[in-house]
Image: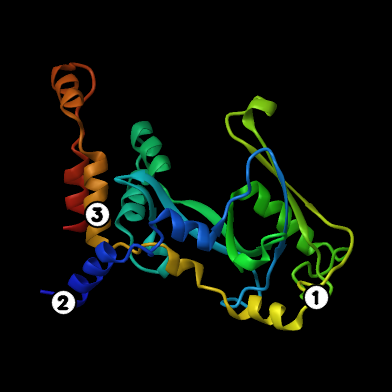
Amino acid sequence: MNLDEIRKRMDRLQNKSNGKSKSDYKANFWKPPSGEKSVIRIVPYKHNKEVPFTELYFYFGIDKPRMMSLSNFDESDPILEFASQLRKSNDADNMALAKKLYPKMRTFAPVIVRGEEDKGVRFWEFGKMVYQELLGVMMDEDYGDITDIAQGRDVTVEVIPAAETGKMYDTTTVRVKPVQTPLSDSAETAESFLENQKNVIDLFNKYSFDEMKESLQKYLAPSEEQETVEATSPVKEKVDLNSKIDDLFG
């Protein structure tokens, strides 16, 4: 028996502050309100001095709303390995399933929200389009280092509701302020912002290889209705995906 693993599982059950509770989420993450404009400052990241952005990969909707890929830790990941095996086949259904299973990248940046400086540094999570735009700005010499604590630039974030654009999802736009400003008028406060930062990867549960394999098996398990349809269908051969998992991992 692995006592360390037993302790970790007990900690996850007992520790509500591990990225689970709503109050803890609000304390650690900032989500721009829909239909409004917000002004933020991207802060130099204590845990990565060179780049303020952290790229993390997640699975969504596989047994749990969100699961971190073990690839974030350079560890073997059963879901990723299984998806990679499916992708190698020439079967269209397998390749479509592989696409669903592959982890999705989300990017996080430490920010101070203007008007809410008392809440300290929180993490803003965003997708590929916003990430590309911010990277483009930071590569532009005309802007300089927008995270510089003395001569950086604030960023206006606007979320346009889907109802206004006719799209399926809200649209987030970013606009970098032309005027350079300090992170804070107080050197002490600025120093506090730089030092009092959590490591974003620690704010999410890390599941073990076996736990993730079990979640994958549950996700792939057909419902009773699906089993009935497949059993009576003379056209399509039923594929036992769980047996494929066992073949892959033993």
Q: Residue at x 40, y 40 (%)?
A: 100
Secondary structure found at label 3: helix
Front position among marks 3 and 1: 1
- Of the residues shown, which amino acid type is indicated by label 3? Lys
Q: Residue furthest left?
A: 1
Distance from Cα at disc 3 to Cα at disc 1: 51 Å
Q: Is residue 71 left or right of residue 138?
A: left
> Amino acid under label 1?
Asp
Looking at the rendering, which quadrant does residue 150 occupy?
bottom right
| The one of 141 and 114 positioned closer to us in this rendering | 114
- Please provide percent x and percent y for residue 79: 32, 52
**Residue at image mark 1:** 185
Which comes sooner in the sequence, label 3 or label 2?
Answer: 2
Residue 229 percent location from the top left of the image: 19, 19
The image quadrant that residue 202 belongs to is bottom left
Disc on res. 213: 3
Considering the numbered disc 2 on the image, is that residue within a helix, a strand or a loop? helix
Q: Secondary structure at mark 1?
A: loop
Q: Is residue 173 above or below residue 248?
A: above
Determine whether label 3 and label 1 are within 8 Å by CB: no
The residue under label 2 is 3
Q: CA distance from mark 3 to mark 2?
A: 20 Å
